Amino acid sequence: MAVRHRLIKTDPSVVWDVIADGSRYADWVVGTGASRPNRGRWPEKGASIEYEVPLGPWRLSNETIVRRCEEGRQLELEILAGPLGTARFSIELREWGEHCLVIADEHPLQGAGGALHNFGAEAVIQLRHRTMLARLARCCEEQAEEQAEQPEQGHEPAARGLGVQESPGHA
């Protein structure tokens, strides 16, 4: 089971805002192209996004489904990777002083990925997670800087789910 962690130097709420925005999935998840909503409202349970994975001259269409969501704390996803099978991916956020400890955990569930899973595959997943968590940290720390530069008055946070903006005065 590939488990990796990273301390991100920002508040956990900023990290959650990034992972809860399905349109930003490709900004931090290694190997994915632009994401788009498929069904439901990301990151609610049962919601899904679609994206492409470029493999040389080919492109695989994949889907990721939210299987469990504890808002602000944990998101568990099932990645449907066509002929490669499915995988479970969990990302947990823990308050760590004034920062956020992010724990990523991924393992194959079914299909070829599960049948062929071995030490070599585990090493590749670890390298992918190291890059993914570095990208997530960059996205979150940049967002925190942008928020710090904005004036406090009139600032409305982005609504959860695929970049929809809330109208002023609406909850």
Image (spheres, helix red, strand yellow):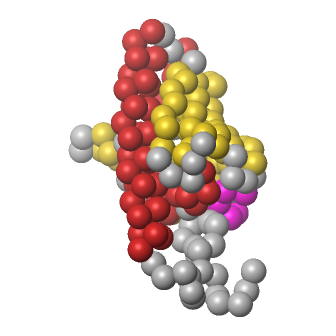
**Res. 56 image quadrant:** top left
Front-lying residue, 129 or 141: 141
Vertical placement of 99 versus 115: above or below?
below
- Magenta-highlighted residues: 39-44
**Residue 46 sits inside the magenta stretch:** no
Say which residue appears at 44% left-offset and 25% top-offset: 125
Which residue sits furthest top? 119
Instruction: Left or right? Give the position of 48 relative to 139.
Output: right
Left or right side of 118 for 168: right
| The quadrant where residue 124 appears | top left
Residue 76 vs residue 156, the one in the foreground: 156
Residue at figure coordinates x 24%, y 44% from the top left: 57
Point out the residue furthest to the front here: 97
**Position of 35 relative to 150 (above/below):** above
Q: Vertically, is 120 above or below 83?
A: above
| Residue 51 seen in this snapshot | no
Q: Position of residue 161 (x, y in %)?
A: 62, 66
| Figure quadrant of the C terminus | bottom right
In-front residue for pair 10/36? 10
In the image, residue 91 lies at what x, y percent?
Answer: 60, 39
Q: Residue at x 58, y 29 (%)?
A: 105
Residue placed most toward the observer, 68 or 14: 14
Q: Residue furthest left?
A: 57
Q: Residue at x 43, y 24 (%)?
A: 126
Percent across and percent down for residue 151 are 48, 82
